Image (tube, helix red, strand yellow):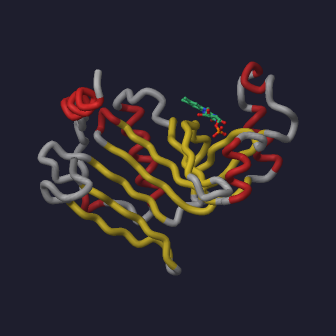
Amino acid sequence: MDASTVADWLRAQPSLLGTPPRLDLGALPDDPVELFLTWIGDAARAQVPEPQATTLATVDADGLPDARTLLLKDVSERGWAVAGQRSSRKGGQLVSHPAAALNFWWQPLARAVRVRGPVEEASRAESDADLAARSPAARATIAAGDWVLWRIQPTRIEFWQGSPDRRHTRIVYDLDGSGWSRETTRGEQGREGNP
Ligand SMILES: Cc1cc2nc3c(=O)[nH]c(=O)nc-3n(C[C@H](O)[C@H](O)[C@H](O)COP(=O)(O)O)c2cc1C
């Protein structure tokens, strides 16, 4: 394929083929953790393979972004937890820039979630407990003390649901001094963010 063929081929690929579930915008919870748990549960019930897989984006010491796939380990008021090796690239990046973003995409439901905020390292006991919960094979290559559980403590969470009429829904929770504020928008056709 030459370059223009690739571009044509990509443009011809169908997108947003998922079937969005019914979404009652009048009954959204004030707490984004609750909505996230509903959505990841919906994804599991819809047979999304590995709905806990997520993209973790970090920034290196030079300000260059990086991203990779990880498994979500926990979600609570304390944050969204992921785990990996301190000695890894992400481990170094989270030391120089303790902030990150997560992105989930559950294709069959035309849903995506973005989470961003500062990152805090869990206690050594929590990290050790996460490592201990892994299979012996997965534990075998990890040096003692190198496994870290990180919590992204979101300041902004976006829930996005595509719509066949291209009027996609975006629900954004922002953390301010008094707690979570929420804004819901339904896109107009042809607007940015409405593929
Ligand atoms: C589905 C999937 C799940 C993964 N889960 C993890 C994980 O939980 N922790 C981890 O450190 N790497 C995980 N990886 C590997 C990472 O994507 C990545 O290759 C590795 O962490 C090194 O990234 P880094 O060089 O940016 O530190 C997973 C990869 C895939 C495809």
What percent of the width, then of the height, locates residue 98?
Answer: 67, 59
Question: Residue visible at 72% across and 24% down?
Answer: 138
What percent of the width, then of the height, locates residue 25?
Answer: 25, 59
Report the number of discs: 0
Residue 17 shows up from this direction: no
Q: Nearer the viewer, residue 95 or 173?
A: 95
Rendered-image quarter of ligand 1: top right
Question: Residue visible at 41% across and 49% down?
Answer: 113
> Within the image, what quadrant is residue 83 found in?
top right
Q: Nearer the viewer, residue 135 or 10?
A: 10
What percent of the width, then of the height, locates residue 65?
Answer: 55, 51
Left or right placement of residue 15 versus residue 62 in this view: left
Figure check: 98 above or below 179: above
Quarter containing the N terminus: top left
Residue found at the very far front of the displayed protein = 2
What percent of the width, then of the height, locates residue 178?
Answer: 50, 80
Question: Residue visible at 25% across and 42% down?
Answer: 21
Residue found at the very far right of the displayed protein = 144
Residue 139 shows up from this direction: yes
Figure check: 60 above or below 42: below
Left or right placement of residue 58 versus residue 157 in this view: right
